[in-house]
Each structure stands twice: as C-alpha cells, then as structure tokens.
Image (tube, grey):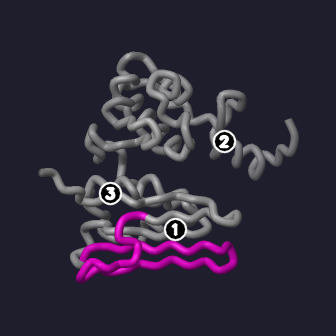
C-alpha cells in the first residue's frame, strides 16, 4: 500500500500588494538548521534562508517584498543542489558590477520541473530548443511553459540562453522583441550618452 508522504507546499503570492514567497522548511524546524537574514526596511524587503548545519543544502526560504529569487531558490531545494560557499550571497543585493552567484541551470537535472502549471521539465525545454525553438515565444507555443501564471518565465529564459550558448547560437539579450537594446545598453544610452527620448 502506498502512503502519502506529503507534498511541496512552496508558494509565491501577492498579498495586499506585497510579493511573498515561502519555500520548504520556511520556519527552520529542521534540527541543526541555520538562518541567513537580509532586511532592507526602506524598500520593505525581508529575505531569510534556512540552510543545513553544514551550510551545503538549502532547506527553506522566506521572501517578502521581493520574490525575484524564488525560482532559483525553489530549484535549489527541490533538486538538493549544493549551495555556494557563502549561501547568504543568494539573497544579498548585487552591488556595482558584482553579480549574485548563480546556481546555473546547467546544474539542474533534466527532470527538474521548470513550469508547475503545465508540468514542463528542463528536459522538455531542451528537446523543444533542439527542435528549433530559439525564443521564449517559440518555447511557450511548443511546451506551454510560461503560459499559465508566468512565474517560470525567468527560469525558462535561463534554460533557453544556456542551451543556445552551448549550441553556439547567439543569445539575444534585448529587453523585448520590440526594443533592440539590452538592459545594460539602455543604461549606457541614458546615463552615459544622456539620451532622454527616442
């Protein structure tokens, strides 16, 4: 007889206009668990990581005010991916040129669920990319990933860009299909070139 062993209760929500996310052991009830906390009262952002005693495994997380790291943190928990040397760097803001460490979608197994709305795995996305889907729009049409709630779009984009780079295909970092500049190029145009209108 099969017994129900529980389910992943992770969730990302918007409550009274505030983005909130909870992953895994968000309360830190695992024996020996340690916490890392980031608080920015001026921006109303609170982030907490719960890690194993040896700092190698993410057990849970709480995100309030900024849930942009939700997708990556969820994959760390669900796939038991080893944490970087300084786990707190996953929730600290990046400062002037220093980027956050990325878990890298390459570390995710092909069985990693990228889109929970339509149960699309990393392997499904790679298969679609290998069939010629080289844009997020094409991946949406082929796999339905990102067509439900849209919360997986950042992770879908990361998988797409990583696979295109592996295949030697140029990665398009434009802001959108209607604007032929990346965020960095746009920043340069505004700050360095002083352009204010188009």
Q: Is residue 161 above or below residue 30?
A: above
Magenta stretch contains residue 49? yes
- What are the residue bounds of the magenta stretch? 23-52
Occupied quadrant, residue 169: top left
Distance (Cα) linking label 3 and label 1:
20 Å
Marks 3 and 2: which is nearer the front? Answer: 3
Task: Tell me the residue that label 2 is attached to.
Answer: 185
Distance (Cα) linking label 1 and label 2:
30 Å
Taking the view exactly as shown, the residue that stands out farthest to the left is 1
Residue shown at 56% from the left, 65% from the top: 20
Mark number displayed over residue 78? none
Image position, residue 43 (x, y; %)? 67, 73
Q: Is residue 41 above or below residue 83?
A: below
Taking the view exactly as shown, the residue that stands out farthest to the right is 197
Task: Tell me the residue that label 1 is attached to.
Answer: 63
Task: Tell me the residue that label 3 is attached to.
Answer: 7
Q: Is residue 126 above or below residue 188?
A: above
Secondary structure under tag 1 reads strand
Q: Nearer the viewer, residue 2 or 185?
A: 2
Taking the view exactly as shown, the residue that stands out farthest to the top is 131
């Amino acid at each position: 007889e099969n017994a129900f062993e529980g389910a992943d209760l992770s969730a990302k929500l918007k409550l009274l206009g505030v983005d909130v996310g909870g992953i895994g052991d968000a309360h830190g009830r695992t024996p020996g668990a340690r916490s890392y906390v980031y608080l920015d009262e001026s921006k109303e952002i609170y982030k907490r990581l719960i890690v194993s005693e040896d700092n190698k495994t993410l057990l849970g997380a709480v995100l309030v005010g900024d849930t942009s790291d939700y997708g990556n943190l969820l994959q760390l928990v669900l796939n038991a991916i080893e944490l970087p040397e300084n786990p707190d760097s996953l929730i600290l803001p990046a400062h002037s040129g220093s980027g956050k460490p990325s878990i890298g979608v390459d570390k995710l197994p092909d069985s990693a669920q990228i889109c929970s709305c339509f149960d699309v795995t990393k392997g499904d996305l790679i298969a679609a990319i290998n069939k010629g889907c080289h844009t997020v729009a094409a991946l949406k049409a082929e796999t339905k990933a990102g067509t439900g709630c849209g919360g997986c779009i950042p992770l879908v984009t990361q998988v797409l860009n990583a696979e295109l780079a592996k295949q030697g295909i140029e990665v398009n970092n434009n802001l959108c299909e209607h604007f032929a500049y990346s965020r960095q190029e746009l920043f340069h145009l505004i700050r360095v070139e002083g352009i204010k209108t188009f």
